[in-house]
Image (cartoon, rainbow, N blue to C red):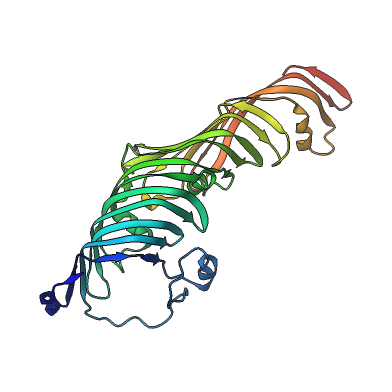
Amino acid sequence: AFVNPLELIGRRIHVLGLHARGVEFGYRKRPENPEEAEDRAAIVPPIEGLDYEPYDGPPGAKKRGWTVVFTGARVREVRDVWVEAFRLQGGGDVAASVTIGAGVDKLISIRSASIRYRGGEILVAGTPAAEQVDLSVDGRMEPFYTKQTRGKGLMTLISARVEGRGRGAVGTLLNQYFGKAGWLEFEGPGRRVTASLDVKRGQVQPGGRVEVEDAPLRVGFAGFIVEGQATARLETVASDGDALADADVEVAFTEYGIRREAEGPSVLTGEGLIVEARSPAELLRFPPEDFDGRIELGRAEFADLTFVNDFIPAGADLVIEGGGATVQGHFETGGRDAHCRGSVEIVTTELALAAAGIEYAGDA
């Protein structure tokens, strides 16, 4: 690296052509209280010499400080980038031009940044999310003051073109999006994922796409388990709300079965089940606090209705003795709490039941 000595007079260090190799980077916010520190200590990066604990000391003294400028910095073999709960491991190359202003409330400007990774691994909160990741990012970050803009607020300053592919844990990726829906949980193996996104000032532009190839998928839904082959995709489309674009997510099953227990028999089988969701495509709102969703059952049937007896209250004097049924229906969700509501139409065939000592048989 080369430092211009003339700029030192004005308390300015200008580094030209910095080159480094084998770098690790960690960033975390200071916890607000001891409870937060205990809950998050295992998923944020350890930083040597800095304990992860709230600060309760006096305000720092104001100093004039120095301005540091990096022009044409290039870092090879970046082994670990760990920001809060997000971690990218592997061997990457980063080229950037950065200015770090003087003073306590520093003005930081990232005029350009180019990131290239091959064969990386992504972890979220310590859980593997993707492997064999090839990543290309070209972007910049609007200038910001460190004491005025923090945490997720930094997301609104990012503009970048992102291209990536890898092998992603389907269940983990979907759970990141549907995390606010406590009644919906995905489980699935690693499959090939491709992504192409364009971000301007934290807003994902229309025309972006993330696709996951066909995979066996299990979904916990309203006390039942849905299992079958499915594809997943995300598309960003022009929004009719306050965001520039919306993210449309679709998980589509071909044939599927629904069971009450993890290893029990399927009580409902069908094809064409679709889980859809829409939310603002903004980095600041991910994972979405609220989204609009819909679950379509497709074409399905109950081969044996006797399982319904498990749901009939004791003492009701009603027993299902046999029969099957075809099913159509949908469920919708929306709002901050992601409550689920919907309707189902069931048409029975050869239904047999006993009620108050009387036998009934027929279609209904």
Whether 260 is drawn above or below 37: the answer is above
Residue drawn at 32 percent across, 38 percent down: 206
Q: Residue at x 50, y 58 (%)?
A: 125
Res 341 seen here: yes
Residue 36: where, in percent of width, then height?
A: 51, 68
Q: Nearer the viewer, residue 254 or 202?
A: 254
Would residue 170 be found to the left or right of residue 282 on screen? right
Q: Nearer the viewer, residue 258 or 361?
A: 258
Q: Judge by depth and name the residue closer to the eye, 330 or 282.
A: 282
Provide residue 61's location: percent of width, then percent of height.
30, 83
Instruction: Please provide percent x and percent y for residue 80.
Output: 41, 61
Q: How many discs appear?
A: 0
Q: Which residue extends farthest left?
A: 6
**In x, y percent, where is residue 55?**
43, 77
Q: Quadrant of the C terminus?
A: top right
Residue in view at x 21 percent, y 69 percent:
1
Most distant residue in the top direction = 362
Residue 96, image quadrant: bottom left
